Image (tube, coloured by chain):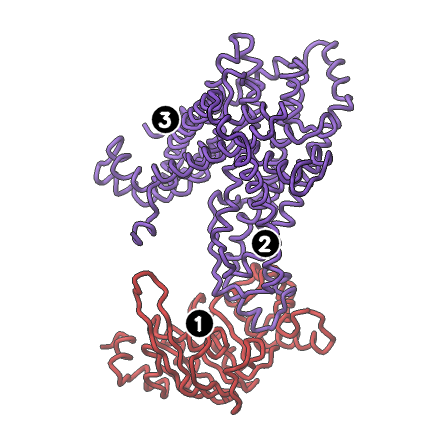
């Protein structure tokens, strides 16, 4: 039964990827008539297309270099100043960008660096500068959290040998820290590059016209503004080719960063380095990450709070957002559970290859950007139904399946360990099916289950990509409503909606993580 | 000559519910130049803590660590004339054998001709002259420990601390490394402390042996007598002869 359900999910996933992609291929008719081939050739030679590809890669590369480069120094500051005041609070704050919707962060960036902000950049904000700032806001904390555990991986003996040999700060960096970081750096960089390449809301709102457009945004513009499905298809295929190339590069790294890394540095083992410099790095990073959120909250407090809260469209959008978040999480967690159960069972019976294949299939959807899937579905469904009427259902489905990689990464390791430990015992006690799920699996796996459900809910609630493609004013979610207000230059209203959306995402995350995951064992003990 | 006088340290149990409890430790012992003193005792008795106190990784609350009559207990780790060989992770994985030894002379790795010669001599002493360009992962466990010993040699310090250096090795390799340690300690006139879990290793490595029990030296005597005809019930218990 377990295996059958796993294989069924596998089939569903394959259909979910192949059907929209096939629809794209057929729609493009790239390999069709000579006229089409000529027009396609002309399209490939199009300066706009070349510009879009160039800009996609440029912003991705620069965002990655800045995030990882600066993140490296901030992570080192955290590692080498283990007793930094409010360390765990700051690192929790650095986890926030994971659940902060991109459109909210954009508003925060505008609030600080916009013409009315604390550090006005003027029109420079709209274009590469603004995109880099927003990507840095998201990915600098991510890089810090992913790189920090590397210091814990350095054997205690190396630190001791270095102090016995009298190594200075630079020599410790060169012989101990850098060799360890070199191992994890490429996988972190590839992950961040992928995130920047598929970034949609940031580029859509901060990109300044044709000069600063990425493939993702160009697909959206082709469909929604230029009404040119042919161009959208070519762009979507290009985006797919780029994503697959990056995924192939990423597959060369055996070590993938953890979704929930261990950030407790063994301060008794890792020697403290120059506290002043460490303090400066940490303080600068905290100011950079904290100010957009703080500034946006201040703007919202000064804004028309009552007016926005009395607006029925806000509550309708909130309802849609919560519905999408909860349904997407249910889909992602259910599919993830079936897939991981089958994978863990295969691993338990010694069929490691099949186990890995099943688990990998859940992450494969990450290679195909949601907008590419969305475009395929848009083109396919537009021939059959009015896609805008089906918007919420399609958005739920895409967000649910796109949330699957997060479930695989958070629940997968725990599920594997759980099966190895208890499979034999459960079999000997003849525990199976619902009884086993209720008595054994759920109580022991509720923590990673809660975390993955909370993560998918928050991400789906804050998603602007798919809803922007399918949504209409009647089916607007909170991110789309916020985008519409921004587009109409209703910045004070937008600030209030942004804080409302942020609070909704954080509250949902917290409630679901606690509701399903329960208190951690530490908290229970102290209670 | 290494002399430890009333060296006190309080081990604070940081585990939940104080599973092991705090322990007051006090050590007294001496080791002559060119001598190996084996340190044996059950897990958690304080063997490694003693080495950490001498190396400076742990700070004693009182007492003296005398090397050739000079108290080093106030010196920083880098200033102490002490070198340590650990059970594992002695080598930096990205550096080849030659560089792993050279880093013991100068962390900047800017070696002059004489210093390079010292590295080659050390490699010869441990029988690895043909493997100088290999990376640690290309060596066996025994060869890795030989490289660590070669680095200890080029450091030319008066005291050598060996913290279970044979734990990861097979029986044949253990005997080989013990012979090498004995030869190097005698040649370089170092005072060596050799922590081991195996009484047989202690017997082979040194004439004298110290038995550590609950943070202090319970017995310090001839290895043969202590380990073959133990007097103390704690030692009999440890050896399983009670």
Do callouts 2 and 1 mark residues in contact (Cβ within 8 Å)?
no
Q: Which chain is purple?
A: A
Mark 2 surroundings within 10 Å by alpha-carbon count, few (fewer than 14), some (14 through 19), many (20 or more): some
Quadrant hosting residue A372: top right
Instruction: Name the front one of labels 2 and 1.
Output: 2
* Chain hosting mark 2: A
- Where's residue A517, x and y in %? 35, 40
Q: Residue furthest top?
A: A384
User: What colour has chain B?
Assistant: red
Label 3's element?
helix
Label 1's element?
loop
Cα separation, mark 1 vs mark 3, equals 52 Å
Residue at x 57%, y 20% (from the top left corner): A469
What residue would you read off at disc 1?
B164
* Chain hosting mark 3: A
Residue at x 47%, y 31% (from the top left corner): A403
What residue would you read off at disc 2?
A283
Residue at x 51%, y 79% (from the top left corner): B160
* Chain hosting mark 1: B
In the figure, A151 relative to B220: above or below?
Answer: above
Q: Are marks 1 and 3 on the same chain?
A: no
Mark 3 surroundings within 10 Å by alpha-carbon count, few (fewer than 14), some (14 through 19), many (20 or more): some
Left or right of residue A36, residue B87 in this image = left
Q: How many marks?
A: 3
Cα separation, mark 2 vs mark 3, equals 50 Å
- Where's residue A187, x and y in %? 58, 44
> Which disc is residue A5 wearing?
3
Quadrant hosting residue A73: bottom right
Along the line of sight, the residue nearer the viewer: A404 or B153: A404
């Amino acid at each position: 039964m377990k295996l059958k359900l796993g294989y069924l999910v596998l089939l569903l996933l394959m259909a979910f990827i192949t059907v929209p992609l096939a629809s794209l291929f057929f729609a493009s008719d790239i390999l069709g008539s000579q006229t089409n081939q000529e027009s396609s050739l002309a399209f490939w030679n199009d300066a706009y297309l070349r510009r879009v590809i160039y800009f996609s890669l440029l912003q991705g590369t620069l965002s990655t270099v800045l995030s990882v480069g600066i993140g490296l120094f901030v992570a080192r500051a955290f590692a080498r100043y283990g007793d930094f005041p409010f360390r765990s609070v700051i690192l929790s704050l650095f986890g926030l960008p994971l659940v902060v919707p991109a459109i909210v962060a954009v508003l925060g960036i505008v609030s600080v660096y916009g013409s009315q902000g604390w550090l006005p950049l003027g029109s420079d904000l709209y274009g590469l500068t603004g995109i880099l700032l927003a990507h840095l806001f998201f990915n600098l904390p991510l890089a810090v959290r992913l790189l920090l555990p590397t210091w814990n991986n350095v054997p205690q003996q190396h630190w001791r040998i270095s102090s016995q040999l009298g190594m200075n700060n630079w020599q410790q960096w060169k012989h101990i820290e850098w060799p360890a970081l070199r191992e994890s750096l490429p996988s972190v960089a590839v992950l961040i590059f992928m995130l920047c390449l598929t970034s949609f809301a940031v580029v859509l709102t901060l990109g300044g016209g044709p000069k600063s457009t990425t493939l993702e945004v160009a697909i959206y513009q082709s469909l929604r503004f230029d009404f040119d499905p042919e161009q959208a298809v070519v762009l979507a295929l290009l985006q797919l080719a780029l994503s697959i190339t990056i995924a192939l590069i990423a597959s060369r790294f055996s070590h993938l960063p953890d979704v929930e890394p261990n950030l407790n540095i063994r301060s008794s083992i890792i020697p403290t380095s120059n506290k002043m410099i460490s303090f400066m790095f940490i303080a600068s990073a905290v100011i950079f990450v904290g100010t957009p959120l703080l500034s946006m909250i201040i703007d919202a407090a000064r804004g028309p709070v009552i007016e926005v809260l009395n607006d029925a469209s806000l509550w309708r959008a909130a309802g849609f957002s919560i519905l999408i978040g909860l349904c997407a999480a249910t889909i992602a967690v259910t599919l993830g559970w079936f897939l991981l159960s089958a994978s863990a069972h295969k691993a338990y019976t010694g069929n490691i290859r099949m186990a890995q294949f099943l688990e990998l299939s859940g992450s494969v959807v990450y290679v195909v950007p949601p907008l590419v899937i969305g475009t395929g579905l848009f083109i396919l469904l537009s021939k059959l139904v009015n896609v805008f009427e089906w918007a919420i259902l399609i958005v739920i489905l895409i967000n649910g399946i796109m949330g699957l990689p997060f479930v695989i990464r958070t629940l997968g390791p725990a599920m594997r360990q759980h099966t190895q430990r208890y499979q034999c015992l459960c079999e000997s006690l003849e525990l199976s099916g619902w009884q086993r799920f209720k008595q054994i699996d759920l109580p022991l796996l509720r923590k990673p289950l809660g975390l993955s459900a909370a993560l998918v809910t928050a991400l789906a609630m804050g998603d602007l990509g798919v809803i922007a493609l399918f949504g209409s004013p009647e089916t607007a979610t909170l991110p789309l409503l916020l985008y519409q207000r921004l587009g109409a230059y209703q910045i004070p209203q937008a600030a209030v909606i942004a804080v409302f959306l942020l609070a909704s995402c954080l509250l949902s995350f917290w409630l679901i993580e606690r509701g399903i995951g329960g208190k951690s064992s530490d908290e229970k003990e102290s209670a | 000559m290494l002399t430890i006088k009333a060296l006190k340290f309080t081990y604070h149990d940081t585990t939940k519910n104080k599973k092991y409890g705090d322990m007051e430790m006090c050590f007294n012992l001496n080791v002559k130049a060119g001598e190996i003193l084996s340190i044996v005792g059950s897990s958690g008795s304080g063997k490694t803590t003693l080495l950490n106190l001498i190396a400076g990784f742990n700070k004693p609350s009182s007492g003296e660590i005398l090397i050739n009559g000079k108290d080093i207990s106030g010196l920083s780790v880098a200033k102490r004339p002490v070198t340590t060989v650990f059970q594992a992770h002695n080598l930096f994985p990205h550096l080849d054998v030659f560089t792993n030894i050279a880093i013991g002379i100068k962390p900047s790795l800017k070696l002059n001709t004489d210093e390079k010669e010292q590295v080659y001599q050390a490699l010869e002493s441990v029988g690895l002259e043909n493997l100088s360009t290999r990376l640690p992962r290309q060596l066996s466990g025994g060869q890795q420990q030989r490289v660590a010993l070669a680095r200890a040699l080029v450091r030319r310090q008066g005291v050598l601390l060996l913290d279970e250096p044979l734990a990861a090795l097979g029986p044949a390799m253990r005997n080989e490394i013990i012979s090498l340690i004995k030869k190097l300690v005698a040649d370089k006139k170092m005072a060596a402390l050799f922590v081991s879990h195996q009484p047989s290793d202690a017997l082979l490595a040194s004439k004298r042996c110290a038995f550590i029990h609950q943070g202090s030296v319970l017995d310090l005597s001839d290895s043969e007598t202590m380990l073959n005809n133990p007097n103390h019930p704690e030692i009999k218990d440890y050896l399983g002869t009670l």
